[in-house]
Amino acid sequence: MGRLFGTDGVRGVANADLTAELALGLSVAAAHVLAEAGTFEGHRPTAVVGRDPRASGEFLEAAVVAGLASAGVDVLRVGVLPTPAVAYLTGSLGADLGVMLSASHNAMPDNGIKFFARGGHKLADELEDRIESVYRQHRTGEPWDRPTGAGVGRVKDYDQGADDYVAHLLSVLPNRLDGLKVVLDEAHGAASHVSPDAFTRAGAEVVTIGASPDGLNINDGCGSTHLDMLKAAVLEHGADLGVAHDGDADRCLAVDHTGTEVDGDQILAVLALAMREAGTLRGDAVVATVMSNLGFKLAMEREGLRLVQTAVGDRYVLEEMKEQGYALGGEQSGHVIVLDHATTGDGTLTGLLLAARVAATGRRLADLAGVMERLPQVLINVKDVDKSRVQTSAELGIAVADAERALGATGRVLLRPSGTEPLVRVMVEAADIEQARSVAGQLADVVKATLG
């Protein structure tokens, strides 16, 4: 068995990789590890548990709740809510632990478990490692120390969680959305109720698609990974913009009034300028990953803002933001973190802030997003190669240097070994798409010949 915790909790095919037994065992282990760490010192512990609408979330939720209660933790069950809502409620309700059951943008058969620490922050890596270690230790038969009688946890439904979360979103919105028509694609996911509610209460005229979850249709041809339905709906309804979430609504992509996609880099650019104008962009800096489009970097430089880049993954963006005190960060995929108002990526908040900027300026989203020009980007996955030699191959280093010279200041090369597969990702940006394809193809051939 490999390491259970990945970059975003424990994830796998529900009832195959991620079983009820595993969910229960990890929950008990989490309760014991946090107790040992002193998190529960001096009070009766409480956990917030939420999920997305996947059918498997029903039995996994039952397993998590049973595990926590059997370990003496009181549980507030908030039902189907976005990941950022569970994180927010963990903080606002003063809970010691938050648990979200979701596989985000993955297909319906998958599911996942993500733990949040007190305050709604991601659990520290060392605590995840300790939880996994304790789980494995007791999985082999060592008995748990179990409370009895009044010591067992109690379980309650917390029905006002959605209202609490929407009220929070509205409280941080800089202005209302009156006069805007917005199409929302909810991916038949966790935000199917709260996102339309928030936009409507903020004053927008809302058209909703992909908001009829049945446990089986999450992310199925809709949401932030499938934008065609949203583009068509925006044009059909003559909307000012469209917003798409993924299954757990921790990300947001957008579509302007012409049906053109507005990606995470462009959203970050729009919000960065809005926050600088409002005086809330600390350090005049934005945090993003090395996969951000070069056009974003050039736009930020032109606007006098700093781009701080991290490794790929929103966890690395968040770590840099917290360590350096930055207020805004995110990824091209639409994970946007506004740290003053959320402890994780929040797709509904991001969409609201983007729409608020359109409303406040009276400008089209296409015009606002035009602050940056997306340079053509070509990505090739070179499979079945020795990815460990990417940084040490002299021949590959020469090929990359030659490619960078050919591209000049308006091009970029990035070679990145996959974290989970035996492949190397070759990414090339250039001012011209044909040049990007040509250079990427040549580099992919060198990777295959050198590392194959």
Image: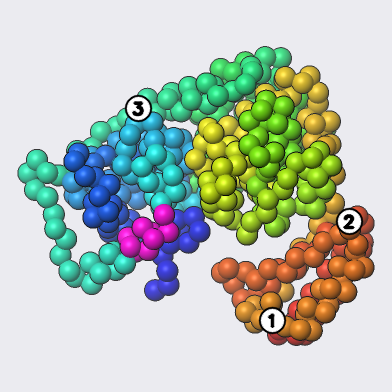
- The kind of residue tagged 3 is Asp
Q: Mark 2 or 1 closer to N-term?
A: 1
Q: Secondary structure at mark 1?
A: loop
Q: Image point 80% across, 53% down: which residue? A: 294
Report whether 349 appears left or right of 57: right
Q: Where residue 205 sits in the image (x, y, percent)?
A: 66, 18
Q: Secondary structure at mark 3?
A: loop
Mark 2 Cα shell of 10 Å, populated few (<14), some (14-19), many (≥20):
some
The reply to whether discs 2 and 1 touch (Cβ–Cβ < 8 Å) is no
Q: Image point 28% across, 64% down: which residue? A: 135
Q: Main secondary structure of the magenta part?
A: helix
Q: Image point 74% across, 33% down: which residue? A: 273
Report whether 275 appears left or right of 57: right
- 451 within the magenta span: no
How far apart marks 3 and 2 lie (CA) works out to 52 Å
Circle 3 residue: 159
- Display colour scheme: rainbow
Residue located farthest toward the left when viewing the structure as drawn = 149
Residue segment shown in magenta: 124-132
Disc sitting over residue 4 in the figure = none
Q: Where residue 446 sits in the image (x, y, percent)?
A: 80, 80
Q: Mark 3 or 1 closer to N-term?
A: 3
Q: Where residue 331 sits in the image (x, y, percent)?
A: 65, 49
Disc sitting over residue 392 in the figure = 1
Instruction: Give the number of marks.
Output: 3
Mark 1 Cα shell of 10 Å, populated few (<14), some (14-19), many (≥20):
few
Report whether 325 appears left or right of 154: right
- The kind of residue tagged 2 is Thr
The quadrant of the picture occupied by the C terminus is bottom right
Circle 2 residue: 410
